[in-house]
Amino acid sequence: MSDTQIVWLRRDLRMADNPALYEAAKRGPVIAVYVLDDDRASTHAYGGASRWWLHHSLESLQRSFAQRHAKIVLRCGDAVEQLLQIAAETSAITIHANRHFEPWWRNAEKALGEKIDLQRYDDANFLTVMGSIKTGSGGQYKIYTPFSRAVRSQFPPRDILPEPESLSSPESLPVSDALEDWNLLPTKPDWAGGMRDFWNVGEAAAHERLDWWETHVDDYDDKRNHPSVEKTSRLSPHLHFGEITPVQIWHKLKHKRSKGWDTYESELIWRDYAQNTVAQFPLYARSNYREDFDQIQWRNPETDPQAARDLKKWQQGRTGYPIVDAGMRELWQTGWMHNRVRMITASFLIKHLLIDWRHGEQWFWDTLVDADYASNATNWQWTAGTGVDSNMFVRIMAPLSQSEKFDAAAYIRKFVPELAGLDEPYIHDPEDHGCLPKSYPPKMISHKAARERALAAYRAMKGD
Ligand SMILES: Cc1cc2nc3c(=O)[nH]c(=O)nc-3n(C[C@H](O)[C@H](O)[C@H](O)COP(=O)(O)OP(=O)(O)OC[C@H]3O[C@@H](n4cnc5c(N)ncnc54)[C@H](O)[C@@H]3O)c2cc1C
């Protein structure tokens, strides 16, 4: 009889193209385990929106396992202890895991590997094997453009793995929590209605979305910056939870010869780049890469009541800047925000409100369904100008002209109903055009004043 194999599931909630599951299933009966371990992740335990997604994603994978007469064991607590306990209960001697790079998972993998045979699979969730893309001198890339060139020179990525040919369970399984008992879904109040309308969760839904995307990707280059139209893939939460892999996406779309596909491939490489950055700097979500920014005089919502009120207005989408408010409300309603608008809202918090990017990173962490330690931190540090590869702090985005440039009128009408009656160009800046509805707030601060304040803070940091 073959030995029982444990598969440790985390952000790889799929049957196909899952190296850990595939290899384990070849060796013997499988016990697939998911451990909800909030303490390890600490400040980056899943926020509300991610918990909602996780519930539905696990539910969907449970159904896929049940179709194959198999089950997922759910446990709550310290992941290492729970896995070792299950191994002891079942006499399993090997745990299979797709490698993860969040600092808390790296620590857990190290601790587990010291106690039991841990088979790790390096290339499960990314286009590249993390750490394998080296500079000419053998170092790690820090800047996106040369990294992406090097990645492309190594394409094609690995082949796709099929679902396991057979999946058997041992005769008796360890006890499992019931998913409902984890209370991942909001109840009082149930704020997830908008997310239910917007998303279909799970591996099958991810592939349906990819089928749709195959017929739209050619327009990506022209339209990806326009939030009023649905011209991006919206695969990010599926990718985050590992319901689909970038390798599956790449192979599905590789026959495309359009500029749209070319640009889309670059965005997928950004995802690898973000992970590659965090693999080198594990605390990237918590500390400025450029340490001189430790000296900038942010307005601190923890000590300054006005800054606290301003942070709240930003979170609630009540800044008086229609494009910013539309984005923040889209996030609240759907758990997702268009990339161009993420850049505008993030820049607004950091530069217009002069609030430390880490407050924004945490808010996005709580509210995005695709909240991802690496992508979130890398993009916030990029916008703030504090990152290893980043936009310069002194480049301050003008939200109102961005709104016009990228045709955001329909987007604003959808998410800011107070402005739904306004035509172009008034809708982008109703205050300036003298048509501010009573129900909509005036701007918190003018663009000019905000710009001057941010530049003064920057000059003071530099000692100029
Ligand atoms: C301040 C800020 C915070 C962000 N936080 C996250 C986050 O927590 N999780 C997350 O997945 N993305 C994050 N992004 C990146 C980007 O906004 C989203 O990946 C994208 O909007 C998801 O929508 P989509 O799937 O339609 O993307 P598409 O435009 O269809 O892109 C395809 C895929 O490429 C990847 N991708 C695209 N842009 C980026 C990027 N700039 N960085 C890294 N990967 C990228 C995503 O996996 C995405 O699904 C953030 C961007 C900003 C500016």
Image: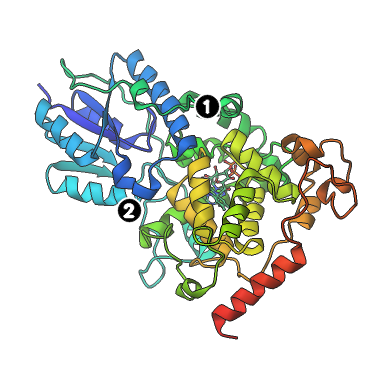
Q: Are marks 2 and 1 in contact (CB under 8 Å)?
A: no
What is the crowding at mark 2: few (fewer than 14 residues within 10 Å), some, or many (at least 20)?
some
Q: Nearer the viewer, mark 2 or mark 1?
A: 1
Percent coordinates x, y for residue 155 in the rendering: 47, 51
Tell me which residue sits at (73%, 48%) in the image. 323
Three-letter code, disc 2: Pro
Tell me which residue sits at (70%, 62%) in the image. 397
What is the crowding at mark 1: few (fewer than 14 residues within 10 Å), some, or many (at least 20)?
few
Is residue 68 shown above or below 86? above
Picture quarter with the N terminus: top left
Task: From the viewer's side, name the closer residue of 83 and 348.
Answer: 348
Query: Is 392 left or right of 442, judged from the image as shown?
Result: left
Which residue is label 2 attached to? 103
Task: From the viewer's side, name the closer residue of 110 and 333.
Answer: 333
Q: Secondary structure at mark 1?
A: loop
* Label 2 residue near ligand 1, CB within 8 Å: no
Percent coordinates x, y for residue 67 in the rendering: 35, 14
Is residue 230 shown above or below 267? above
Which residue is label 1 attached to? 189
- Image quadrant of residue 261? top right
Picture quarter with the C terminus: bottom right
Percent coordinates x, y for residue 345 in the rendering: 64, 52
Task: From the viewer's side, name the closer residue of 69 and 72.
Answer: 72
Three-letter code, disc 1: Pro
Is residue 155 shown above or below 447? above
